[in-house]
């Protein structure tokens, strides 16, 4: 029977609700900066989220939602430029605002760290965004708590492909059965399950209708002593929030 050795965290939507008030706003700032009259509202952004990766999402928008857009220049270069500007805006937002982590994230990370579990971050977002989020929420020193930060273009195929999880497992020399992943979206779960990783889902507004089949459990969030979590799909946790003991229990059931 495999022992639980590591926790792997997705970032956007899982560690923090970054999409609607973070990435979306930053994309819109980049559009304005280049004089484009594009505006991604809440609802449109929800549709665009079916494609992971900011550059890939921009291309999807042009191919499927803004097909009248004509550009005389190099479209790849425009997408690259927009994305670089968007990243600058996103990082600046994190530095200037109080975007907080989702319930239970900091508590669980601290508990796991003192219990000797290994930690990693596995995300499709750009590395600079992870650095900004972690250092502006958990503190700069927290960047060292994560043995591997697997992010962005380090693999060619983003989630839902398993590549980024496979990359992280290889970097940490871990078997999938020794880990638990935290994800928030259907694309994330497809990716982690394709890498054979047991996965806990904390869904959110954008992902509530996603397909999470195969996940260990689906929760509204990880919970806190004063803010119990709710099970959406799966058996009762027998506790008001997700702790290391709860995870070891869940892990034992599947290993
Ligand atoms: C979420 C994503 C990212 C972000 C935007 O990643 O798909 O593309 O929306 O970030 P995850 P970039 O849930 O895996 O953390 O613009 O830097 O791609
Ligand atoms: Mg996510």
Image (tube, rainbow, N blue to C red):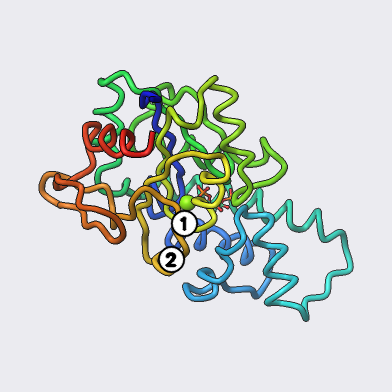
Dot in front, 2 or 1: 1
Of the numbered discs 2 and 1, the one sitting upstream in the chain is 1
Residue 30 percent location from the top left of the image: 61, 60
- At 25% across and 43% down in the image, what residue appears? 104
Quadrant hosting residue 21: bottom left
CA gap, disc 2 and disc 1: 8 Å
- At 36% across and 61% down in the image, what residue appears? 204
Quadrant hosting residue 144: top left
**Crowding near pointer 1: few (<14 within 10 Å), some, many (20+)?**
many
Residue 113 percent location from the top left of the image: 30, 23
- At 57% across and 45% down in the image, what residue appears? 194
Residue 119 percent location from the top left of the image: 41, 27
Please tell me the numbered disc located at residue 185.
1
Q: As drawn, is 139 to the left or to the right of 54?
A: left
Q: As drawn, is 168 to the left or to the right of 113?
A: right
**Crowding near pointer 2: few (<14 within 10 Å), some, many (20+)?**
some
Q: Can residue 141 be seen in this view?
A: no
Q: Residue furthest bottom?
A: 68
**Quarter that holds the C terminus:** top left
Residue nearer the viewer, 226 or 42: 226
- At 72% across and 42% down in the image, what residue appears? 156
Residue nearer the viewer, 175 or 166: 175
Q: Residue furthest front?
A: 1
The answer to whether mark 1 is within 8 Å of ligand 2 is: yes
**Quarter that holds the N terminus:** top left
Please tell me the numbered disc located at residue 206.
2
Badge 2 element: loop
Residue 12 percent location from the top left of the image: 46, 50
Q: Can residue 166 be seen in this view?
A: yes
Q: Are marks 2 and 1 in contact (CB under 8 Å)?
A: yes
**Image: 137 above or below 61:** above
């Amino acid at each position: 029977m495999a022992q639980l050795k590591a926790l792997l965290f997705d970032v956007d939507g899982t560690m923090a609700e970054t999409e609607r008030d973070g990435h979306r706003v930053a994309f819109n700032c980049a559009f304005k900066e280049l004089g484009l009259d594009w505006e991604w509202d809440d609802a449109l952004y929800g549709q665009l989220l079916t494609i992971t990766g900011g550059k890939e999402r921009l291309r999807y928008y042009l191919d499927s939602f803004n097909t009248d857009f004509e550009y005389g220049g190099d479209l790849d270069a425009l997408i690259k430029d927009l994305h670089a500007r968007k990243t600058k805006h996103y990082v600046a937002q994190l530095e200037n605002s109080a975007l907080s982590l989702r319930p239970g994230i900091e508590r669980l990370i601290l508990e796991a760290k003192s219990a000797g579990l290994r930690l990693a971050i596995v995300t499709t977002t750009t590395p600079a965004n992870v650095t900004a989020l972690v250092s502006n929420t958990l503190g700069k020193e927290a960047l060292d708590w994560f043995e591997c930060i697997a992010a962005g273009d380090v693999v060619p195929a983003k989630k839902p492909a398993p590549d980024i999880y496979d990359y992280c497992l290889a970097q940490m020399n871990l078997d999938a059965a020794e880990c638990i992943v935290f994800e928030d979206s259907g694309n994330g779960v497809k990716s982690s399950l394709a890498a054979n990783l047991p996965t806990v889902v904390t869904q959110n507004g954008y992902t509530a209708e996603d397909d999470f089949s195969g996940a260990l459990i689906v929760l509204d969030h990880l919970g806190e002593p004063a803010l119990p979590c709710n099970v959406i799909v799966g058996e009762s946790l027998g506790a008001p929030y997700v702790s290391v003991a709860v995870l070891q229990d869940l892990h034992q059931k599947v290993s």
